[in-house]
Amino acid sequence: MLCSSCGLIIAENIHDMGPEWRAFDSEQKEKKARGGAPIKFMRPNKGLVTEIDQYNRDIRGGKISPKKQAQLYRMRKWHKRISVSSSMERNLVIALSDLDRVASSLGLPDNIKESAALLYRKAVKDGLIRGRLIESVVAAVLYAICRIQNIPRTLDEVSKASGIPKKEIGRAYRFIKTELRIDVPLTDPSQYISKFATSLRLGGEVQEEAAKLIGKALRKGLISGRGPTGVAAAALYIACAMHGEKKTQKEVADVAGVTEVTIRNRYRELKKELGLKVEL
């Protein structure tokens, strides 16, 4: 590497981190690649494991003798025991299977599962799990990652999927957030607009109007201290009235998981502060 102006050599003997072979199409590239599977935080051993299969056959596919089968059985048994020898490994086996169950129930993609598994591993490493339910910490970690990645999942949904009370999840979430110093952004109510609108079978114009109302409310600082689901539900309710869509407060409240009183309170606040001329 040299300077094009004066010819000064900036660096030499630079290591080429790429492959030493050439490929002219995707098929050649795939055949010549030597990398193994990526590390998976969702697996207790991160995917770096050796397994002894259950087929009891030799390399040619023929059956092996009963004596060899007994030997392989003992090898599998001890191999399994050694794989989860420490308390941390046993904890991860239980926690990661539960994490996969809850995340699948919430319809979360693999990258969210991986991020949640990594955060859980950090919590285990720092000794934050001791004295707490594994299931509550798993639910708290998933809720935190959903908020960080701006995925609209409410605490009610996480509680329902995990079977853990909201109070317990909230306590574990606040503890982990403080101890690991996680920077969790404030939830934007507009994230819930499309989700609620789909359940209510509302059109794009209503969704767009509701998003505009929330944008104005954010700029005026009306969202601070308010539940994002309640604000999103009220904005949708107002947008329905503005576009002639007939939806009752109960219908919107049931979809959003809030009470009708909450929607009425948020509706009055938005109408007053934004100067809306709409009658419901």
Image: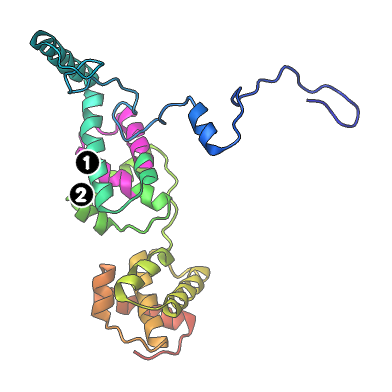
Residue 96 place in picture, x, y as percent: 26, 36
Most foreground residue, 108 or 157: 108
Q: Is residue 70 above or below residue 214?
A: above
Q: Amino acid at mark 1?
A: Asp
Q: Is residue 127 in the magenta section?
A: yes
Residue 54 place in picture, x, y as percent: 17, 23
Write down the quadrant of residue 122 in the picture: top left
Q: Which residue is mark 2?
A: 162
Q: Is residue 44 above or below residue 162?
A: above
Most foreground residue, 106 or 13: 13
Q: What residue is shown at x 37% (from left), y 46% (from top)? A: 112
Most foreground residue, 207 or 2: 2
Q: What quarter of the picture does the N terminus occupy?
A: top right
Most foreground residue, 31 or 217: 31
Residue 137 place in picture, x, y as percent: 26, 41
Q: Which residue is mark 1?
A: 98
Q: CA distance from mark 1 to mark 2?
A: 8 Å
Part of the protein shown in magenta: 115-143
